[in-house]
Amino acid sequence: MKAKWGSPQNRPLADFASLIVINAKALAATLTAHNTEQKDLQGEMAITGEHLENNQSVRDMLLKRGVKPEDLPPEEDLKKLERRLASEEKKMGKKLKGWKKK
């Protein structure tokens, strides 16, 4: 997905991923944690297998609902968004300092 979105390899996918992709990954990870405990899974292979199965199940559900994650457009770069927000907050602070009560 990073290549398709043109995002840097050294940046987290979540910095560009849509909310639906982030939540799908979170659901798969939560299912893995739950099932690891419920099924008393031991060892890397068993837990990795569970994780892969959960990711596939979540993906299948998305596809069934007409959502193909790799076809979703990337979101705005989180770092750029954070910089813009900080800049706007700084500008607002300057404007408020110049404002006086009458």
Image: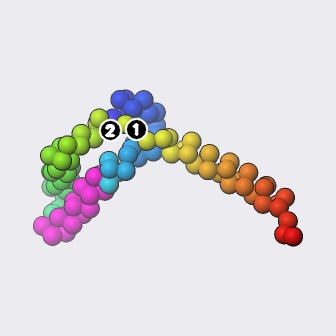
Query: Callout 1: few (<14), some (14-19), or many (20+) C-alpha neighbours within 10 Å?
Result: many
Q: Is residue 20 left or right of residue 93?
A: left
Magenta span = 24-39
The image quadrant of residue 12 is top left
Tag 2, which secondary structure?
A: loop
16 or 41: which is nearer to us? 16
Colour scheme employed for the rendering of this structure: rainbow
Secondary structure predominantly adopted by residues drawn in magenta: helix
- Taking the image as shown, residue 64 lies to the left or right of residue 20, namely left
Q: Is residue 1 above or below residue 64?
A: above
Q: Residue furthest front?
A: 102
Task: Give the labeled residue for mark 2.
Answer: 72
Q: Residue at x 68, y 48 (%)?
A: 87
Say which of 54 and 22 sits in front. 22
CB-based contact (under 8 Å), mark 2 and mark 1: yes
- Quick one: SS at disc 1? loop
Q: Is residue 100 visible?
A: yes
Q: Residue at x 28, y 52 (%)?
A: 24
Q: Find out whether residue 80 is within the magenta segment.
A: no
On residue 74, the disc is: 1
**Coordinates of residue 36 in the picture (x, y in percent):** 19, 64
Residue shown at 19% from the left, 56% from the top: 47
Q: Position of residue 62 (x, y in %)?
A: 20, 47
Pinpoint residue 51: horizontal percent, then vertical percent: 20, 53
> What residue type is disc 2 on?
Leu
CA neighbours of label 2 inside 10 A, class few (<14), some (14 to 19), many (20+): some
* 21 relative to 26, above or below: above
The image shows residue 5, relative to residue 25, as above or below, that is: above
Disc 1 residue type? Answer: Pro
- Give the vertical position of 32 relative to 71 (above or below): below
